[in-house]
Amino acid sequence: MRTTTARAYPNIALVKYWGKADEELILPAAGSLSLTLDHFETTTTVVPAPEAATDVLELDGSLADPGQTNRISVFLDHVRELAGREDRVLVRSRNSVPTGAGLASSASGFAALATAAAAAFDLDLDARELSRLARRGSGSACRSIAAGMAVWHAGDDESSFAESVDAPDMRMIIVTVNRARKAVSSREAMRLTAETSPFYSGWVSSTEDYLEQMVAACSAEDFTRIGEITESHALRMHGLIQSTVPPIRFLNPTSHAIFDAVAEAREHGIKAYSTADAGPNVAVIVRPSDAEALAERLSGFGDVRVVGPGPGAHLLTAADEVPPAAGTSAGEGSHA
Ligand code: DP6
């Protein structure tokens, strides 16, 4: 085993994943498609700790809570099983955005962890196997293994992975409305939706249809159709989520105002379309030449960032290792 560091970027889905066919293997009820970004990265270092009794997670410079540590430990158990080893590890992870606020930080987090852990445990995985592994941590993480536009195939454990597809160049404007950790996790809300929404089966079949149309629109470089599907599918997902019992609402009045402002920009000739994940923040796709003007228009709604298609998850060198948290014994040593 060896110490390794990897970096991965979040992705924002244009055809959303919302519902599982298998909770343990994290197989989706339908395929999805997303754009891996070039901002908001997660960097993760995995340090072998063969004498330790448990895995340890340091997140953004502090010891993580037991819930978060347990979630990565369950994932690492799978890595250990693949490697035929029992070693515990110390994981140090640093996000450039706050976790759990609907900016898909679990996607970049598990894509970076899968990439670093596979290398730390000397697993020789190709991109498809790495995507399948990341999927076991968080479904959407399998798409952050791939660069740019990526399709995650529904299927069984073997065939459910993500891979890049051709798409027209575009920018995404991320409007951060609220940085707080969301009250209900995607995982929990997804389960509640499948269990209680009367619209769930229609959602799954319409997602399959949209994915097929979206892949065709991407390969035809039809930006308008890509946009129309993106916005319509996001609104369907949020409608679906509101139909759960008890209802869950992730969008707030500011989110809705951004959708309206983007629709108004279209009236003025700026082709742009909105989407939002499980939180109030809105992501707007736009052609590169219109990105700055639209970002300016949206700047009154929150913190605005123009981002583009980014790289897939990758290993870094020892120079990029995440430093130990202050207050840990290793951290105290390095600050002495
Ligand atoms: C709304 O991938 O976080 O962002 O597989 O349970 O970890 P788990 O869920 P997660 O869900 C992402 C949901 C979404 C839509 C999407 O990214 O496709």
Image (cartoon, rainbow, N blue to C red):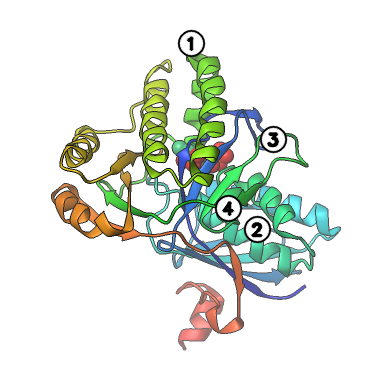
- Is the residue marked by circle 3 packed among few (<14), some (14-19), or many (20+) residues within 10 Å? few
Q: Marks 4 and 3, Cα distance to the nearest angstrom?
A: 18 Å
Circle 1: residue type? Pro
Left or right of 128 on screen, residue 151 = left
Vertical position of residue 333 compared to residue 233: above or below: below
**Amino acid type of the residue tagged 3 in the rendering:** Glu
Q: Label 4 neighbourhood size at 10 Å, few (<14), some (14-19), many (20+)?
A: some
The span from disc 3 to disc 2 (Cα, nearest Å) is: 17 Å
* Three-letter amino acid code at the position of disc 2: Ala
Q: Is residue 28 above or below residue 129?
A: above
Residue at numbered disc 1:
198
Q: Is residue 52 visible?
A: no
Is 314 situated above or below 14?
A: below
Which residue ends up furthest to the right in the rendered image?
84
What mark, if any, has residue 24 been given in the picture? 3
Identify the amino acid type marked 4. Answer: Thr
Is disc 3 placed on a helix, strand or loop? Answer: loop
Labels 1 and 4: the sequence-earlier one? 4
Residue on which the image places disc 2 = 114
